[in-house]
Image (cartoon, grey):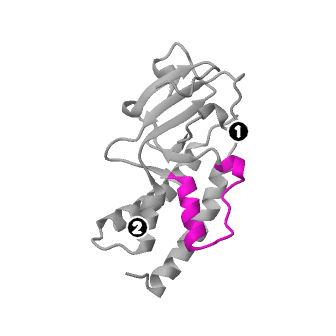
């Protein structure tokens, strides 16, 4: 089943907005100030828009190649890692705050190789996993989808930034599997 011209026009308009927003998201500073509550709410609208498409596409008995690729490339289920440089050793979960907002995680196997994390830095590594009935939004997969179907020259970020393998997903205590303190992190540790 192929997309109609109307579906394609609607998709192009949506993708233009998404591309601009995604570039702003990945170019946010990794150190210093957190995203503001207002900014997180603004981005939640973007993630909800993607979720609406996921829900719509999943509900179809017969999917177009476009829809099947969107689901395959954008949905992420599995292990996630997040680095916090600000923490409090005396608080439960080192002061990690649960959030309903989507935030940046990585699916990278070697967390300490992320371009902005230095082994000499103090911080905590949060290891989590998406809930069975939930998924994260894979930004590299979304970028690949945009390249395949809309803009072959689109680049969400530099190869270094894309090496972060960012996935957006909320912080929920029940999905945190481990929190490790200090700068020496064993990437192969469970």
Quadrant of the rendered image containing residue 174: top left
Residue numbers of the magenta segment: 138-162
Q: Which residue is tagged 1?
A: 115
Tell me, yes or no, if residue 102 can be seen here. no
Quadrant position of the N terminus in the picture? bottom left
Indicate the position of residue 178 as horizontal and vertical percent values.
45, 25
- In the rendered structure, does residue 137 fall within the stretch colored magenta? no
Q: Are marks 2 and 1 in contact (CB under 8 Å)?
A: no
Q: Which residue is tagged 2?
A: 68
- Say what secondary structure mark 1 lies in: loop
Residue at the image point whose x is 36% and y is 47% from the top: 134
Is residue 69 or residue 8 the one in the foreground? 69
Q: Crowding near pointer 2: few (<14 within 10 Å), some, many (20+)? A: some
Indicate the position of residue 34 as horizontal and vertical percent values.
63, 38
Give the answer, above or below, for where 47 lies relative to 89. below
- Furthest residue to the top? 90
Residue at the image point whose x is 68% and y is 32% from the top: 117
Indicate the position of residue 138 as horizontal and vertical percent values.
51, 52
Quadrant of the rendered image containing residue 84: top right
Is residue 121 or residue 35 the one in the foreground? 121
């Amino acid at each position: 089943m192929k997309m109609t011209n109307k579906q394609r026009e609607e998709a192009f308009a949506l993708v233009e907005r998404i591309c601009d927003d995604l570039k702003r998201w990945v170019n946010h500073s990794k150190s210093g100030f957190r995203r503001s509550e207002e900014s997180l709410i603004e981005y939640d609208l973007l993630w909800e828009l993607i979720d609406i498409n996921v829900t719509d596409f999943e509900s179809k008995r017969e999917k177009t190649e476009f829809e099947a690729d969107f689901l395959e490339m954008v949905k992420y289920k599995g292990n996630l890692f997040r680095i916090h440089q600000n923490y409090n050793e005396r608080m439960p979960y080192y002061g990690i705050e649960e959030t309903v907002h989507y935030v940046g995680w990585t699916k990278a196997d070697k967390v300490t190789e992320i371009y902005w994390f230095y082994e000499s830095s103090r911080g905590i590594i949060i290891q989590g996993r998406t809930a069975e009935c939930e998924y994260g939004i894979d930004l590299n997969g979304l970028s690949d989808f945009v390249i395949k179907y809309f803009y072959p020259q689109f680049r969400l970020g530099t190869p270094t930034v894309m090496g972060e393998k960012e996935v957006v997903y909320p912080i929920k205590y029940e999905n945190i599997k481990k929190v490790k303190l200090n700068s020496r992190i064993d990437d192969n540790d469970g």
